[in-house]
Image (cartoon, helix red, strand yellow):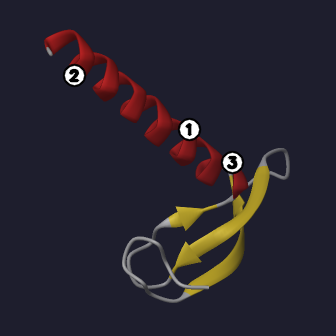
Amino acid sequence: MNCPKCNGLMMYEKFMDMAETSSFYFYGWRCVFCGNVVDSIIMANRLNAGRQNNEVKRRRLKKAG
């Protein structure tokens, strides 16, 4: 898998909370070059944020025009 940010190598890892307790962890992909972290939740949020930004821009353009 290539990093969507820098096209670098992505490694599958287990991420833990700062205290490194077993109470919170998730699995995701981390880029070995830029450190970008991606998992299913992050990707879904980025896709939804992009859609919301496009809708807001369209609304503003319609009001201005």
Given the image, on which type of amino acid does mark 2 rest?
Leu
Mark 2 and mark 1 in contact? Answer it, CB < 8 Å. Answer: no
**C-alpha separation, residue under disc 2 versus residue under disc 1:** 20 Å
Using the image as rendered, state which of residue 3 and residue 15 is in the foreground.
Answer: 3
Quadrant that contains the N terminus: bottom right
In this rendering, the answer to whether 6 lies above or below 19 is: below
Q: Which residue carries the number 1 mark?
A: 48
Image position, residue 23 (x, y; %): 84, 44
Quadrant that contains the C terminus: top left
Q: Is residue 61 left or right of residue 39?
A: left
- What number is the disc on residue 61? 2
Q: Earlier in the sequence, mark 2 or mark 1?
A: 1
| Residue 26 seen from this side | yes
> Dot 3: few (<14), some (14–19), or many (≥20) neighbours within 10 Å?
few
Given the image, on which type of amino acid does mark 3 rest?
Ile
Using the image as rendered, state which of residue 33 and residue 21 is in the foreground.
Answer: 33
Q: For the view shown, which residue lies furthest in the left direction?
A: 64
Mark 1 and mark 3 in contact? Answer it, CB < 8 Å. Answer: no
**C-alpha separation, residue under disc 1 versus residue under disc 3:** 11 Å
Q: Secondary structure at mark 2?
A: helix
Q: Which residue carries the number 3 mark?
A: 41
Given the image, on which type of amino acid does mark 1 rest?
Asn
Image position, residue 2 (x, y; %): 53, 84
Nearer to us of marks 1 and 3 is 1
Image position, residue 42 (x, y; %): 60, 50
Residue at 55% in and 46% down? 47
